[in-house]
Image (cartoon, rainbow, N blue to C red):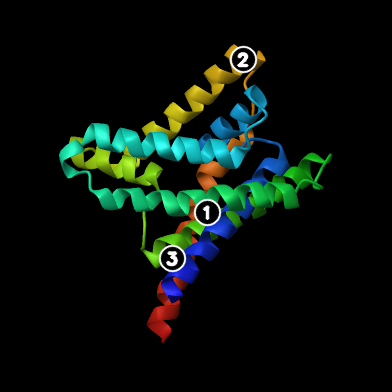
Amino acid sequence: IRRWIMFVVGIYILTFGVSLAIRAGIGISPQSSLTRTMTLVFPPLTQGTYNFILELIMLALTYVVMPKDFKITAFFSLVPAFVLAVFLDLNLMLTEFIKLELYQAKVALLVFADAALAFGLFLMIIANLVLMPVDMFVNTICKRTGWKWGNIKTGFDCTLLLTSACIGLAFLGEVKFIREGTIINAILIGQYIRLYFFIYRRFKASK
């Protein structure tokens, strides 16, 4: 029960970080940039809805890549994906009032947002319960090809960025939500998670 509570809290904190990063307005992560761009292309659907649709697509692609190893339990990954979608829309609504003009303030908000996002991811990793379909797809590609996980994840993120840019150019006439903040996000998330794990291990060792 404690692990499930930690997992759900992690999802909420993660979506809170994503929402703040969006409000910073200087670029967001590859996955968020794609789903955020889609809200401008077809506004009736929320970003949480587009995020859930993306997770569905990734689950389907996981089956396509390795159909023999695909288990019915993989569908359980849609439960946290749905919770994430709900929390994302909720936090986007709660942070709607944030409108910053000063560039330094936007950077500061993004740095804090990445810290929150990474802490949410950290809690989900520690809980070690269910993989999101996106992560499941990356793991499946890793098993199928034997390539390094980090290289596959980088390639996957770049594919999402390229898709986001192409959709933005095709439907909106410009690239949206891919800026310097996207690079800052890519650098900080990993470093924050390393820091959290360092503190976590030191805490466990002291106990």
* Label 1 crowd bin: few (<14), some (14–19), many (20+), radius 10 Å: some
Q: Residue furthest right?
A: 101
3D distance between C-alphas at marks 1 and 3: 25 Å
Is residue 107 toward the left or the right of residue 11 in the image?
A: right
Residue tagged by mark 1?
83
Asked if labels 3 and 1 touch by Cβ distance under 8 angstroms, the answer is no
SS for tag 2? helix
Circle nearer the viewer, 1 or 2: 1
Is residue 155 toward the left or the right of residue 89 in the image?
A: left
Task: Inspect this view and state whether residue 80 appears.
Answer: yes
Q: Residue furthest bottom?
A: 207
Of mark 3 and mark 2, the one earlier in the sequence is: 2
Residue 180 percent coordinates (x, y): 62, 33
Circle nearer the viewer, 1 or 3: 1
Residue at the image position 64 percent from the left and 52 percent from the top? 113
Q: Amino acid at mark 3?
A: Phe
Residue tagged by mark 2?
171
Residue at the image position 38 percent from the left and 36 percent from the top? 58
Is residue 8 toward the left or the right of residue 73 in the image?
A: right
Q: Quadrant of residue 67?
A: top left
Q: Amino acid at mark 1?
A: Val
Residue tagged by mark 3?
197
Q: Nearer the viewer, residue 65 or 191?
A: 65
Circle nearer the viewer, 3 or 2: 2
Q: Residue furthest left?
A: 68
* Label 3 crowd bin: few (<14), some (14–19), many (20+), radius 10 Å: some
Q: Amino acid at mark 2?
A: Phe
Of mark 1 and mark 3, the one earlier in the sequence is: 1
Q: Considering only vertical position in the picture, is 44 above or below 137? A: above
Of mark 1 and mark 2, the one earlier in the sequence is: 1
3D distance between C-alphas at marks 3 and 2: 41 Å
